[in-house]
Image: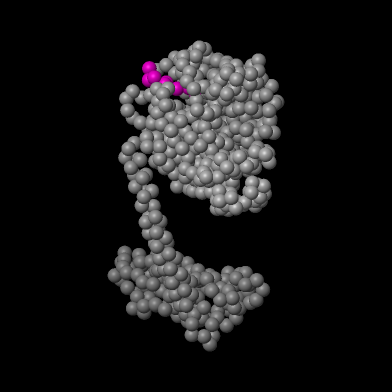
């Protein structure tokens, strides 16, 4: 048995008995078959139209009984099986062909060019054009000179079709995070696109573009609420996409090609062909790196629900399967042959079963003891064990989901209202600032010629108050001379011995206290504002000003 696609575990008949689904190359390597195993024996097997590139099980509706569907991605199609019988076939939409290529085949159809000229011009288009050639033209370029004419006569009347193929596939929850919730299929194509399919109608819900061809996918969240998608591509980068984003939001640049991608809680664990594991945040920050003793062949997630444990499994070329929690080694499993695929989950009636397929076509099944506890070894420092405890997060209610959708739909209007209010606030602040500068209402001078700073202190209970003005020259080296102090006040309420006096020479950096006394004349327990103006001789506009809110005279109020 030669296993091709990743093995999948699913309750195919809704009876609580989880079975193993694998792809077999078949006799002679030419007859691919789909095999279902119950324990170590083959329960059923059925022929496949093509070799599968990826496999996934998902629930496509809420109908009873809740039996999952099996999706096999092969070439440009997704074959969906229900109850192990063909249910639906989804084909990727065709891509527009190169117009120059179409024109050449039209000329060949009319016998205006010979096959040799056709080959030369197609090779020139393949090297220069941005749109790739169709499969028909690529096959033609591989032929010998003696086979070209027969191929042209056979295919010249056919329309040019350019079809992409599926490179990777995974599932994404539709609107609930429950284990038995409806899921969507997420496809990565050779055309550098990601497609999200509706689970019932199999129509395209969303299309996202990538700079390179995706080879590994990891998703989290729900499509109708919020989701985050990580795609490892052939150019050695990992791109992070979120809901309603047509292009990647973040990019993680790797120093080598990725050979596996697994999400453990909020950490993306990436295996590279430099025999190392790397941990990244979703924003691209590298958290840790672990060097492996051999090349990494496959990776997958180990999740033990009973203990809230999530770890990453890595199958190595030396026949080892290593299990890591972050960068801490938990366990090493040694196998007689190199492991090419891993799967962990419920198999039969056992919740924690490890399925391994080997390079030679072998199948290894290991059951984790229910009392087993993974012990972190190596004595490496890390976060406390309490940090790894799984929190009991409540489910999202329908009201929460509806409110989230409502806010998302009105997001544009909310943003515009916020921007309008922000612009009005900035306009009012600018007008108030200009008015303060023009009327010198600020306690700090706005001119560079007279850099001054003023603040006032009122002392006393009344009816006589001591008013102290602290005037400071904030320049670095130039003294200021010729300043005047003027008080403006209600003469029916207050009396000052000097309402106008000169200021002595102000030395830079020193604060000069200027004292005067204010006598309150009112016995009604009221107070008013006293304005202090700092003037320059010969100028009518004040340099700066201060408004002093005088306290109520407690002496007169008591009398």
Q: Position of residue 375 (x, y in %)?
A: 58, 20
Q: Identify the residue at horizontal 57%, vertical 71% (top origin).
A: 472
- Quadrant assignment, res 290: top right
Q: Position of residue 324 (x, y in %)?
A: 60, 26
Q: In this view, does 366 lie above or below 105?
A: above
Q: Identify the residue at horizontal 43%, vertical 33% (top origin).
A: 89
Q: Identify the residue at horizontal 68%, vertical 41% (top origin).
A: 145
- The foreground one among 149 and 528 is 149
Residue furthest toward the front?
Answer: 111
Q: How many labels does the image show?
A: 0
Instruction: Identify the image quadrant of the N terminus.
Output: top right
Main secondary structure along the magenta-highlighted residues: loop
Q: Do we see residue 426 in this rendering?
A: yes
Image check: 258 left or right of 391?
Answer: right
Instruction: Identify the image quadrant of the C terminus.
Output: bottom left
Question: Which span is picked out in magenta?
Answer: 8-15
Q: Do we see residue 512 in this rendering?
A: no
């Amino acid at each position: 048995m030669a296993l091709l696609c990743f093995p999948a575990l699913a309750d195919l008949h809704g009876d609580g008995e989880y079975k193993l689904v694998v792809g077999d190359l078949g006799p002679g390597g030419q007859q691919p078959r789909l095999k279902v195993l119950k324990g170590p024996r083959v329960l059923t097997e059925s022929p496949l139209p093509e070799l599968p590139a990826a496999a996934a099980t998902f629930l496509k509706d809420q109908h009873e009984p809740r039996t999952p569907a099996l999706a096999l991605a092969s070439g440009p199609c997704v074959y969906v099986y229900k109850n192990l019988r063909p249910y639906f076939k989804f084909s990727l939409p065709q891509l527009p062909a190169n117009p120059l290529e179409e024109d050449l085949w039209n000329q060949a159809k009319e016998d205006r060019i010979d096959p040799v000229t056709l080959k030369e011009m197609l090779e020139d288009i393949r090297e220069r054009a941005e749109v790739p050639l169709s499969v028909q033209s690529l096959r033609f370029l591989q032929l010998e000179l003696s086979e070209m004419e027969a191929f042209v006569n056979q295919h010249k009347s056919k329309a040019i079709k350019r079809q992409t193929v599926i490179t990777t596939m995974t599932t994404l929850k539709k609107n609930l995070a429950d284990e038995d919730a409806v899921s969507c299929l997420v496809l990565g194509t050779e055309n550098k696109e990601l497609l999200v399919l509706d689970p019932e109608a199999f129509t395209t819900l969303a299309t996202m573009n990538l700079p390179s061809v995706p080879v590994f996918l990891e998703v989290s969240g729900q499509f109708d609420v919020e989701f985050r998608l990580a795609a490892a591509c052939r150019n050695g980068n990992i791109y992070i996409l979120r809901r309603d984003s047509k292009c990647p939001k973040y990019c993680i640049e790797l120093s080598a090609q990725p050979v596996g991608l697994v999400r453990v809680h909020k950490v993306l664990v990436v295996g590279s062909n430099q025999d190392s594991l790397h941990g990244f945040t979703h924003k691209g920050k590298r958290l840790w790196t672990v060097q492996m003793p051999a090349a990494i062949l496959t990776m997958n997630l180990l999740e033990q629900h009973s203990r809230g444990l999530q770890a990453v499994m890595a199958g190595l070329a030396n026949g080892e399967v290593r299990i890591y929690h972050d960068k801490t080694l938990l366990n090493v499993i040694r196998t007689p042959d190199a492991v090419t695929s891993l799967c962990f989950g419920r198999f039969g009636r056992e919740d924690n079963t490890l399925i391994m397929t080997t390079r030679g076509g072998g199948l290894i099944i290991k059951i984790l003891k229910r009392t087993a506890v993974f012990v972190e070894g190596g004595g490496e420092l890390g976060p406390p064990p309490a940090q790894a405890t799984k929190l009991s997060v409540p489910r999202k209610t329908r009201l929460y989901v509806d409110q989230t959708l409502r806010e998302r739909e009105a997001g544009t209007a909310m943003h515009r209202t916020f921007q309008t209010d922000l612009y009005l606030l900035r306009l009012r602040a600018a007008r108030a600032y200009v008015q303060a500068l023009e009327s010198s209402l600020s306690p700090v001078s706005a001119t560079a010629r007279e850099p001054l700073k003023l603040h006032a202190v009122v002392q006393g209970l009344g009816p006589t108050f001591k008013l102290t003005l602290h005037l400071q020259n904030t320049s670095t080296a130039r003294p200021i001379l010729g300043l005047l102090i003027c008080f403006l006040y209600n003469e029916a309420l207050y009396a000052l011995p000097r309402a106008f006096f000169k200021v002595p020479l102000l030395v830079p950096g020193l604060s000069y206290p200027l004292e005067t006394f204010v006598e309150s004349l009112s016995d009604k327990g009221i107070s008013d504002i006293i304005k202090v103006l700092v003037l320059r001789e010969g100028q009518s506009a004040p340099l700066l000003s201060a408004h002093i809110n005088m306290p109520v005279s407690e002496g007169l109020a008591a009398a």
